[in-house]
Amino acid sequence: MSVKDQINPDKLPKHIAIIMDGNGRWAKSKGRPRIFGHQSGVTAVREAAESAAELGVSYLTLYAFSTENWNRPRVEVNALMRLLLQTIKDEIVTLNKNNIRLNAIGDLASLPKINREHLQRAMDETKNNDRMTLTLALSYSSRWEITRAMQLLAEEIKKGNCNPEDVDQQCIEKLLTTTGMPDPELLIRTSGETRISNFMLWQIAYSELYFTPKFWPDFRKEDLYEAILDYQYRERRFGKTSEQITKQK
């Protein structure tokens, strides 16, 4: 029996988030420039999105470019922005064919104007697709997101629209860039690193973490199936005991 056939469709994570790591090291291991690794990682993005949608996953969020990535060498950043632009233009047909809606979170205003324009166009052209939502985290970091949410909250309090004593988790969640989306049940990171790297820190409070040594360009649908199957074997207690969980079943 294949790994895919072992997956229980009734226990699928509704939202999967992936930290796509290892493009540069993958390229270096082959004696190629870092951008070659980023280019090769596009195939992994396509496979992850198509296979997740095929299984019935409702949300897939990919950490594509962090706010810290702006500190990389200018030549690499410029190449990444060109690659992002070309990929968005090339993948609209595939997204529509698979009934996948494109979404984006992060400090999008910091992206080059042409990237913002094509990103918005792609989101507009796929907005009616309802099989799965593919979210790209671009110029994103969780500390940026939470800081922005606190600024918005402070403005609401200053305007008298909210009292400090009324602030609760739901109030804050409405101000995050992921508002309206369920929290990820499964977070995958490739390349063997076991860090969160400032990604969705609020949202992954109870996510199951899965780390694979594979570099992102080598990540294929079978690897996604393995991660989901591993997730399904775990007991999710949310602070309760095993006995409490068993009684609820």
Image (cartoon, helix red, strand yellow):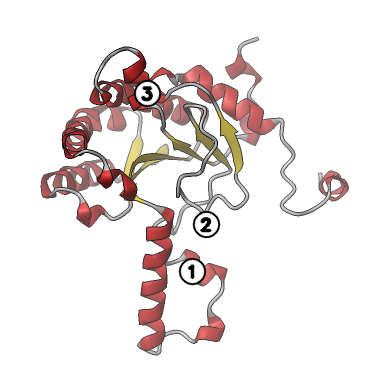
Q: Residue at x 51, y 84 (%)?
A: 164
The label on residue 25 is 3
Q: Residue at x 45, y 24 (%)?
A: 51
Q: Residue at x 29, y 13 (%)?
A: 31
Mark 3 element type: helix
The label on residue 208 is none
**Where is residue 161 shown, x and y percent of the image?**
41, 86
Mark 2 element type: loop
Q: Which residue is mark 2?
A: 202
**Where is residue 165 shown, x and y percent of the image?**
56, 85
List the single residue furthest toward the bottom. 160
Report the Cα–Cα distance between label 1 and label 2: 10 Å
Q: Nearer the viewer, mark 3 or mark 1?
A: 3
Residue nearest the observer in this picture, 240 or 29 = 29
Q: Amino acid at mark 2?
A: Trp
Assign the C terminus to one quadrant of the image: top right
Q: Which residue is mark 1?
A: 172
Indicate left or right for 176 with 239 as reference: left
Residue 169 appears in view: yes
**Where is residue 137 shown, x and y percent of the image?**
35, 45
List the single residue furthest toward the left. 114
Q: Residues within 10 Å of mark 3 (few under 14, many from 20)?
A: some
Q: Amino acid at mark 3?
A: Arg
Q: Are marks 3 and 1 in contact (CB under 8 Å)?
A: no
**Where is residue 178 shown, x and y percent of the image?**
42, 55
- Say whether disc 3 or disc 2 marks the residue closer to the N-terminus: 3
In the image, is residue 196 above or below residue 142?
A: above
Report the Cα–Cα distance between label 3 and label 2: 29 Å
Residue nearest the observer in this picture, 69 or 201 = 69
Q: Residue at x 12, y 50 (%)?
A: 113
Q: Are marks 3 and 2 in contact (CB under 8 Å)?
A: no
